[in-house]
Amino acid sequence: MMRTPRIPLRAGPLRLISALVIAALVVTACAPGDTGVGEDEDIDEPAEDVDIDDPAEEEATGASELRVTVWTGNDAHLALFDEIADSFVAQHDTIESISFDVLPFEDYNDALTVQLAGGNPPDLGWIMERNGPEFVQSGVLHDVGSSLRGTEGYDFDDIEESALELWVDGDSVYGYPFSTSPFALFYNADMYEQAGLQTPDELLEQGEWTWDALRSAATTIVDEDIANHGFVVRDFEFSLWDNLATVWRGWGASAWSEDGTTSTFADPEMVEAMSWFHSMVFEDQAHPGPGQSADFFAGDAALTITQISRASLLEEDGFAWGLVPLPEGPAGAQQVVGQAAVGVFTNSEARPEATEFLAYWTNEENSRAMAQFFPPPRASLLTAEVLAETNPLLTGEQLERVVIEGIATGGPIPSHPNFAQLRDTIRSELDALWEADADVQSVLEQVRDASEPLLQ
């Protein structure tokens, strides 16, 4: 299959506006020339062939190519997608190719928005859970509910209702949550042994696997020059602040109230959690600071928080490692689930073909194959036995307590219908926190005051 080269995004940040009328795609303006959309072009109207009133199956368009945006550049992931796509193409004479367009993770939402606003939008694409409500409410995603339910052998009822929560509105379905994956903690067992420390697995068995135990071990490993960094929240990099939910949930903290209308950034639980993390970065120097980077899988750090799909980065002849759930904090053991869905875009000129490929890509057989990287939302596949078939690197015990129990008990990464604006505003306000002498309470109050109006 063809793959679009990974090209860095040059356009400035864009915000996807969630309150759209008649499902028209609207994006904020970019600098001229950045998006490929001319000043005289109207990007507020959906494609001419879009029938907003009829989300049911449509006549095939005769399209010969499909393009899918993804954020993974992992060769193993892409090889599996290519295999599935090849099989689909072989069964459809009219479709010549399916290409996977790899966009950088850190710029994915902005880059995707640029493409959707241009003259050649993708047909399908991955959507992050944090942006799910925004995409669903905006009309950018095509309703595939009737098509999935009507596909022979698809067994739509096998999909866990809780996994679909962000992606449905009544009977309408706007995305298939192909990956419902708990965040977990990988650790370098060789570094623990060199430091003479009990491993997280041993602490877990003793009921002593806590955030403070993690901090103590990470600091010791750095102090003894075993590694430059003890612990890293992967993909956070002082930019994707919502990934810190994997830490602050242990204190019972949250970014906003459950109904999404009130900021809770300055609540005592968040202040305590962020003070703990700030001290780990600037006092203990056990977590990389701003401008620094560390890759656990390259042996740069002793511990990292990420999802099990990253296990494919572990080399067979590398270091000894382990995998455990997130530690306990003052609020107990609070697991966090990350989710990614794939949907068909309203502005695609090949929606019937794209919808048919979505049904094929996410059927039971292919979901079983993808389970080696992406825990599926299908109840029939969420067993240690099934997951072990496609996850040879992980033991049945790891799969049970990290994946299955994590999905059953974990809460999602923060999401909101106005997440794009909240993301940028909160990130900007949090910049003041990433200084050694920052007043945590004061900064978080500023975050609260700045984000509160955007929650209304």
Image: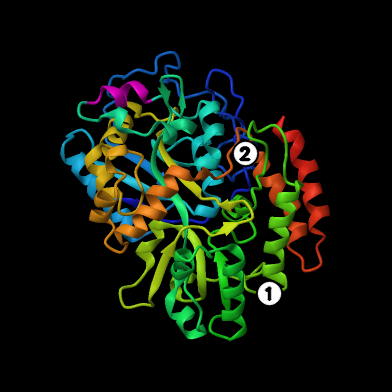
Question: Which residue lies under the disc numbered 2?
Answer: 419
Q: What secondary structure is found at the residue carrying circle 2?
A: helix
Give the x, y percent position of residue 251. 65, 52
Q: Is 81 placed left or right of 279 in the picture?
A: left
Where disc 1 sits, the SS reads loop
Of callouts 1 and 2, the N-terminal one: 1
Which percent across, then down, holds residue 236?
A: 58, 58
- If the image is split into quadrants, where does the C terminus sit? top right
The x, y position of residue 361, in whole percent, is 28, 39
**Which amino acid lies under the numbered mark 1 shown in the image of this protein?**
Asp
Quick one: label 2, few (<14), some, or many (20+) residues within 10 Å? many
Up the image or down, 297 lies above or below 103; here it is below
| Magenta residues (range) | 144-151
Q: Amino acid at mark 2?
A: Phe
Tell me if I can see residue 73 in this picture: no
Q: Please, which colouring scheme is shown?
A: rainbow
